[in-house]
């Protein structure tokens, strides 16, 4: 019974990691949050492989419709994968006094480093009944969305609260 419960917990944690920001490390000197849509990415890869295999099977049996199956059935999910799958990571580092914002897609890697003192706090940007976490800055830098997708998940609220608690602790420690 214990092993089955642990497997269910692990599966739930993996799904939760795919949907919202996950706290990877929460230490007094460093806070790391990450978001990677593993479930969507894995589903698209399965779709790509299945369509390519079906199309190749049709091609090898002599049917030219297999070429269309490969081109459309695999190219569309591949295009969605290339455009939609983004891995986000935010690193708050008290020792270096920086916040590093990273976003990686299949073709691009963006990284921005800001002084930690410029970050005002973490907030939730609402849209209808969904929200996403953002970082507003003290200067005229526009707020940075930590993830691009809006969600109804409570994990975004937990991530925002964790960031704000960590920022308060880091500022208190720096002032002492």
Image: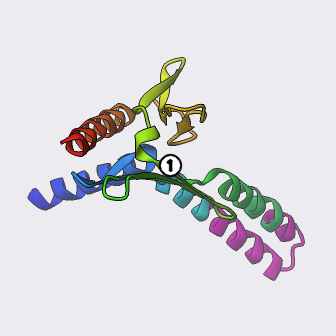
Judged by its main secondary structure, the magenta piece is: helix
135 on left or right of 9: right
Q: Which residue is mark 1?
A: 114
Q: Which quadrant, please, contains the N terminus? A: bottom left
Residue at image position (67%, 62%) is 108
Residue at image position (73%, 63%) is 74
Residue 41: x percent and y percent? 55, 57
Residue 131: x percent and y percent? 48, 27
Q: Nearer the viewer, residue 118 or 99?
A: 118
Can residue 34 be seen by looking at this rendering? no
Residue 117: x percent and y percent? 41, 41
Is residue 89 depicted above or below 66 in this figure? above
Is residue 40 depicted above or below 117 in this figure? below
Total marks in image: 1
Furthest residue to the front? 176
Give the residues in magenta: 47-69
Q: Nearer the viewer, residue 175 or 76?
A: 175
Furthest residue to the top? 128
Residue 106: x percent and y percent? 65, 64
50 on left or right of 61: left
Residue 85 lies within the magenta run: no
Furthest residue to the left? 2
Classify 10 Å Cα crowding around label 1: few (below 14), some (14-19), many (20 and above).
Answer: some
Furthest residue to the right? 64
Q: Which quadrant, please, contains the C terminus? A: top left
Q: Nearer the viewer, residue 120 or 80?
A: 120
Look at the numbered disc 1 and give the secondary structure of its residue: strand
Can residue 12 be seen by looking at this rendering? yes
Residue at image position (30%, 33%) is 161
Is residue 56 depicted above or below 159 in this figure? below
């Amino acid at each position: 019974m214990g092993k089955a419960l642990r497997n269910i917990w692990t599966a739930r944690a993996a799904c939760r990691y795919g949907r919202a920001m996950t706290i990877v490390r929460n230490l007094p000197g460093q806070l790391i949050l990450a978001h990677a849509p593993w479930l969507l990415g894995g589903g698209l890869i399965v779709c790509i492989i299945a369509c390519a295999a079906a199309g190749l099977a049709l091609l090898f049996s002599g049917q030219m419709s297999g070429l269309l199956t490969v081109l459309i059935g695999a190219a569309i999910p591949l295009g969605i994968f290339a455009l939609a799958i983004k891995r986000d990571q935010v690193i708050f580092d008290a020792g270096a006094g920086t916040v590093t914002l990273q976003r990686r897609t299949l073709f691009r890697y963006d990284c921005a480093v800001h002084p930690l003192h410029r970050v005002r706090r973490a907030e939730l940007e609402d849209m209808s009944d969904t929200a996403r976490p953002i970082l507003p800055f003290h200067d005229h830098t526009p707020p940075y969305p930590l993830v691009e997708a809006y969600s109804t998940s409570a994990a975004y609220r937990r991530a925002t609260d964790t960031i704000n608690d960590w920022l308060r602790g880091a500022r208190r420690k720096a002032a002492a």
